[in-house]
Image (spheres, grey):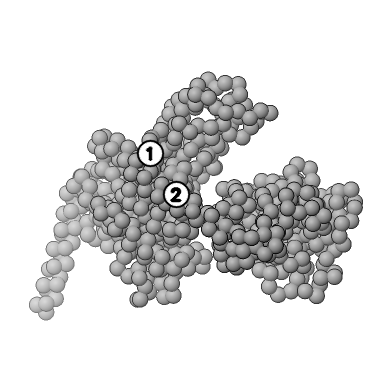
């Protein structure tokens, strides 16, 4: 009985201390600087916008779009330092947070497996990092190595990793490397930071090691918030990798949450200024989006786009009760004022932008208030240059062998190959782009079929050694591999879309597919050009007529998934999922896996029979004479 009395006495003292802590709280002005989904994009990204709003441009410059180099870690390091100093001079406390998917997507990850990312991140010196689903792409050991590097590569910075819902297996190397939360003392006030990673996507699309699992995101977050509240911490920041919509629908309404710093959906949030910069991706919501938690108190929800093109600058004001009284701030775009270039031509003549035009663009961007013309951090430049040299060497390394040349073409017999005659691509089209579609299917385990536009491939594949550089020359654009859920009827429609656009606007729209095959009659009208459409999911089993009502998962590139090159039916598909893996990187991975690149079997080419627009038959349907394969 005496033991129970002592126990309850201790509990009362603990609760009294927690209540006293809450009562003694003071207002806090907090600035949260944040990044998400940089995906091993360590160099600057070129972003294009319209020149129509820029005053003072020459006639030639005004007739072209404008290219601006955003981000790149050396500039991001400077941007963080600048914004931190600015906030502190204004009497605000500062935390720097990363909401996951730091790795995979470029050659920097292929070669360094997160070590280059960790080095660059350590120069920012994030106060907390939450793993995303892609941190698990190569299993627990790769993530453990990344965390070890992140916490040791810079002696003055050991970024804690927060993940309330990641439960490592007993023997996992992640044991002891993850915290459910971390508490910071800022301006005499305690701020708790809780991390949460997306569960299903990580378990189903990445590769946690056997025994490692993720628990329900909402339940895990609430449990850890309750622990912090019980300790008297009344200012709670969730760092989530779950996507903007999930943050709004699931996380913002939790009990006790004040701020949600998000990732995963690569969402650009902003205001009217952000929207006015034509060419940026669609602004999905306000920065910050203000919601209400379970207690009816304000919650600030933000995200900071992708690839280090933006730094989120969120200003949160707390009153003495720990309640949010203001959510302010904006995404900030660190850019290179010396690298303004003329973009896509809207006139007939190409134009190299001059110093006067550059000054006009810089003046315009600076006046918007969201752009920061900051110089690169010298140490980051030096460190990155060492990795860049190795990446350049990597691009020359052989990743596969090609016994015989593989011909490129867009339309069958068009004659774009530099190694083969036009007759070599009749009647079935170029084998090079056919191989690319096969590669995309092979590396995307969830997909049944793959579709690639002929113009997204650019070259033949010569006999001999095949390198990283060859893969990126073949697939040079900044496209990502994405998956879509589509019915058989939609697949037929999107192929018709592509042919119609290819015949009237751009030959680059011609479709190449893996796991699909068909006959083409270019002399027919739209809706009648594709016939004998068959499917062979993942190129296993037998070919069979496609079912118009069945649902198939198709992998394609992000460019045509957005309806470009005439692929309009793609925009009606459901459940678009972006892998955030560059499409060239997909070819690299496939090449490394198979070791030898050869022309796909003729029976697996997507185009089996081809009649050109003049009605000339260049090959009869292969679907009858190949039906036994």
Query: Looking at the rendering, which quadrant does residue 114 occupy?
Result: bottom left
In this rendered view, identify the residue nearer to me: 472 or 278. 472
Q: Which residue is situated farthest in the left direction here?
A: 2
In this rendered view, identify the residue nearer to me: 165 or 144. 144
Q: Position of residue 26 (x, y in %)?
A: 20, 45
Residue at image coords 78%, 49%:
415
Q: Nearer the viewer, mark 1 or mark 2?
A: 2
Q: Position of residue 212 (x, y in %)?
A: 41, 72
Q: Earlier in the sequence, mark 1 or mark 2?
A: 1
Q: Residues within 10 Å of mark 1 (few under 14, many from 20)?
A: many
Q: Position of residue 432 (x, y in %)?
A: 69, 57
Q: Residues within 10 Å of mark 2 (few under 14, many from 20)?
A: some
Residue at image coords 54%, 35%:
67
Residue at image coords 29%, 58%:
152
Q: Are marks 1 and 2 in contact (CB under 8 Å)?
A: no
Q: Is residue 498 left or right of residue 308?
A: right
Q: Which residue is situated farthest in the bottom direction here?
A: 1
In this rendered view, identify the residue nearer to me: 64 or 484. 64
Residue at image coords 63%, 52%:
474
* Helix, strand or loop for disc 2: helix
* Helix, strand or loop for disc 1: loop
Query: Looking at the rendering, which quadrant does residue 240 occupy?
Result: bottom left
Q: Is residue 1 visible?
A: yes
Residue 548 higher or lower than 171, as above or below: above
Q: Which residue is mark 1?
A: 376
Q: Position of residue 337 (x, y in %)?
A: 44, 31
Q: Is residue 585 visible?
A: no
Q: Which residue is mark 2?
A: 388
């Amino acid at each position: 009985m005496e033991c129970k009395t002592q126990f309850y006495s201790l509990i009362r003292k603990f609760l009294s201390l927690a209540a006293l802590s809450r009562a003694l709280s003071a207002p806090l002005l907090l600035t949260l600087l944040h990044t998400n989904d940089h995906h091993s994009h360590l160099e600057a990204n070129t972003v294009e916008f319209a020149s129509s709003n820029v005053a003072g441009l020459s006639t030639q410059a005004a007739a072209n779009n404008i290219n601006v180099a955003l981000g790149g870690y050396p500039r991001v390091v400077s941007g963080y330092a600048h914004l931190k100093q600015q906030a502190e001079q204004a009497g605000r406390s500062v935390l720097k947070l990363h909401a996951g998917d730091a790795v995979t997507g470029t050659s920097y990850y292929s070669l360094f497996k997160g070590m280059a990312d960790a080095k660059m991140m350590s120069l920012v010196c994030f106060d907390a990092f939450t793993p995303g689903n892609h941190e698990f792409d190569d299993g627990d050991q790769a993530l453990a190595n990344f965390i070890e590097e992140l916490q040791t590569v810079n002696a003055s910075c050991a970024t804690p990793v927060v993940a309330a819902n990641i439960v490592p297996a007993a023997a996992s190397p992640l044991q002891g490397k993850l915290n459910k939360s971390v508490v910071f003392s800022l301006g005499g006030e305690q701020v708790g930071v809780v991390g949460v990673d997306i569960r299903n996507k990580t378990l189903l699309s990445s590769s946690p090691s056997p025994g490692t699992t993720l628990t329900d995101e909402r339940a895990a977050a609430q449990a850890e918030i309750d622990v912090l509240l019980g300790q008297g911490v009344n200012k709670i920041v969730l760092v989530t990798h779950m996507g903007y919509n999930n943050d709004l629908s699931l996380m913002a309404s939790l009990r006790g949450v004040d701020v949600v710093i998000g990732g995963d959906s690569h969402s650009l949030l902003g205001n009217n200024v952000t929207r006015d910069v034509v060419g940026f991706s669609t602004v999905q919501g306000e920065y910050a989006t203000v919601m209400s938690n379970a207690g009816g108190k304000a919650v600030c929800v933000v995200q900071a786009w992708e690839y280090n093109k933006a730094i989120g600058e969120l200003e949160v004001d707390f009153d003495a009760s720990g309640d949010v009284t203001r959510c302010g701030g904006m995404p900030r775009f660190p850019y290179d004022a010396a690298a303004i270039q003329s973009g896509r031509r809207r006139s007939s003549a190409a134009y190299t932008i001059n110093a006067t035009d550059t000054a006009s663009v810089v003046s315009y961007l600076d006046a918007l208030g969201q752009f920061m013309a900051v110089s690169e951090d010298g140490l980051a430049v030096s460190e990155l240059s060492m990795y860049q040299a190795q990446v350049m060497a990597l691009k020359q390394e052989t990743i596969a062998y090609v016994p015989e040349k593989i011909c490129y073409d867009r339309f069958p017999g068009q004659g774009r190959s530099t190694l083969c005659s036009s007759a070599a691509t009749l009647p079935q089209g170029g084998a090079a782009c056919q191989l690319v579609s096969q590669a995309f299917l092979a590396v995307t385990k969830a997909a049944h079929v793959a579709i690639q536009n002929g113009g997204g491939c650019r070259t033949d594949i010569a006999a001999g050694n095949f390198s990283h550089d060859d893969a990126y020359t073949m697939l040079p654009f900044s496209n990502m591999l994405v998956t879509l859920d589509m019915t058989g009827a939609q697949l037929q429609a999107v192929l018709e879309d592509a042919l119609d656009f290819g015949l009237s606007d751009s030959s680059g729209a011609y479709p190449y597919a893996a796991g699909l095959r068909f006959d083409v009659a270019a002399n027919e009208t739209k809706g009648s050009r594709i016939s004998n459409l068959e499917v062979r999911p993942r190129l296993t089993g037998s070919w069979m007529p496609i079912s118009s009502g069945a649902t198939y998962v198709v992998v394609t590139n992000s460019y045509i998934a957005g309806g470009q090159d005439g692929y309009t039916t793609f925009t009606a598909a459901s459940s678009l999922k972006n892998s955030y893996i560059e499409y060239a990187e997909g070819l690299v991975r496939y090449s490394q896996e198979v070791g030898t690149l050869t022309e796909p079997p003729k029976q697996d080419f997507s185009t089996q029979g081809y009649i050109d627009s003049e009605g000339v038959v260049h090959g009869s349907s292969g679907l009858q004479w190949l039906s036994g394969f």
